[in-house]
Amino acid sequence: MSKANKAAAGLLAGVKAGHKQARKDKALAADAAHARDVALVPLASITERPGGDTRTPDAEHMEALALSIDALGLLQPLTVDNAGRLLCGGHRLLAVRKLAEKDPDRWKLVPVRRMDFDAEADPNRALAAEVAENEQRRDYTPAEVRALAERLKAAGFKNTAGRPRKGTKALLPALGAVVGKSKRQLIRVLKPEPKMVTHVTFSDAAARLRRALESFTRDAVQSTKGTLSDPQKRAINDAAKLIRRLEKMEGES
Amino acid sequence: MNKPLWVAVVGRKGGSGKTALALGLAAHYVRERRRVVLVDLDPQGSASLALDADASGEHLAEVLEGNAAPEMVTHVTFLDVLTGGPALENVNATRTLRDALDGVEADVVVMDCPPGHADLDRLALHAADVVLAATESHRLGIAGAARVLDEARTVKPRPRCALVLGRVDERRGLDRAAPNLLAGAFSVPVMSIHQDSRLADALNTGSLPPGSGRAAQDVAAVAAWVDKQSKRKGDA
């Protein structure tokens, strides 16, 4: 290996190591955020949002959630203010209450994250907390989604084509209600074989191109022993620029 | 009052040129008669120390924990410093930097981030309009930059990011190879700050980096890129 090639490989090894560490950082941060300030409190102590629900509850979503919470437990704690008033998790609370009608002992205590303010005195902050949770909802990795799918299957949920027959427990709606992904996203995660892509968002496309460019650059550096030709450098820079433009378009669209 | 532009200088690895870049930018803006607040998020208080300010206070930690209102140390006209110090190491921030500095008058807020502290980096990335990842052209620094750029994309969907190579000396093979290679590997703009002893001297003597010289020209180019991003942000 030439000296230049060794130098380039060394730098790229740094890039790779950094990406790997970042993935670990992300997982650790998510776990820490998840575990922070979570306590078990009596279900009966949680009261309604002051001023009622911001959105009308979606009965279908609530049913799907109830099924999956029954099978998996309440993975995402409810959020309440310092007086136990609900801030985030309207559907989850309705679902747990429904489950508690059948099995009150199992749902006597539920996990909540308590925020230290009074929602009645500070309704703006209550709304901000709700919006923030919806925006920052934990993003489940494909591996986590597959693991949850396996647990649901073990609990009798089935992934059937078409509309599920009455009485059967359908996998995708229950899974989707937990991880907050659409049916199409779930199908893609659960069946990772390549298939025709008919619709991608700009940021999807940009992320894919970014990965492709990274691997292209690595190969190019290896095959030229680290001495990229000017046209190659131009091509790489042009591609990088296009990717940035693509990301920007999403911001403006 | 215009909203300030928030610039985070991050890097994760120690000695990657973060403080030199942050102070270089601050000096550049001050010379343009723009009001700068320099936030020293480093438990080592490097930026504070380089400006002859107290690098052992607990003030910024108390501000972040919601127990104090921000009080700046004025270094020169147009440059106020929110000093860092060891208490930041275990800070349990209860509010964001933007909330903590709400109402502070500034045109630019420059955040100098610490080495090896993911939580403090995250506070800065959350507040930032523009993220500058500082590194040298070396595997160990590049790993830190990759890590923190990924983090920036986790915190915000489309952050304005650039990689800034420090202490560049083109007689070194690594410094010649790095810009193109990393532009491709990260698909972000890559800029260079050249080796310049006047910059190092300034950090050592408690004075602002000089307005002329190789590094000053390079910092001006970085500042121009940052301004371009802020205009773009205004358009959106």
Image (tube, rainbow, N blue to C red):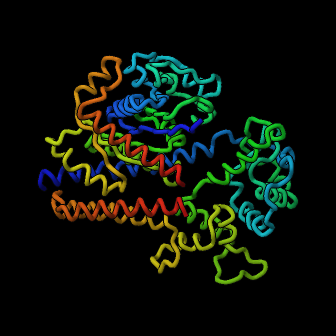
Quadrant of the frame with the C terminus of chain A: bottom right
Return the x and y of residue B43 as percentages of the image width and height: 46, 25
Residue shown at the point (17%, 42%) measured from the top left: B170
Residue nearest the observer in this picture, A81 or B175: B175
Q: How many marks?
A: 0
Determine whether, in the image, residue A78 is placed left or right of residue B127: right
* Residue under the point 36% across and 60% down: A241
Q: Residue B138 at x, y = what percent?
A: 26, 43
In the displayed structure, does residue B8 sit left or right of residue A236? right
Please tell me in which quadrant of the rendered image residue B171 appears: top left
Q: Kindly give the residue lying farthest to the left in the view shown.
A: A2
Measured along the vertical axis of the image, is residue A140 above or below residue B9? below
Q: Is residue A165 above or below residue B1?
A: below
Q: Is residue B211 visible?
A: yes
Residue B21 percent location from the top left of the image: 35, 34
Residue farthest to the front, as pictured? B33
Report the quarter where the N terminus of chain A lies. bottom left
User: Image height check: is A38 above or below A196?
Assistant: above
Residue A89 vs residue A65, the one in the foreground: A89
Evaluate whether residue A24 shows in this view.
no
Q: Position of residue A36 (x, y in %)?
A: 64, 40
In-front residue for pair A233/A208 = A233
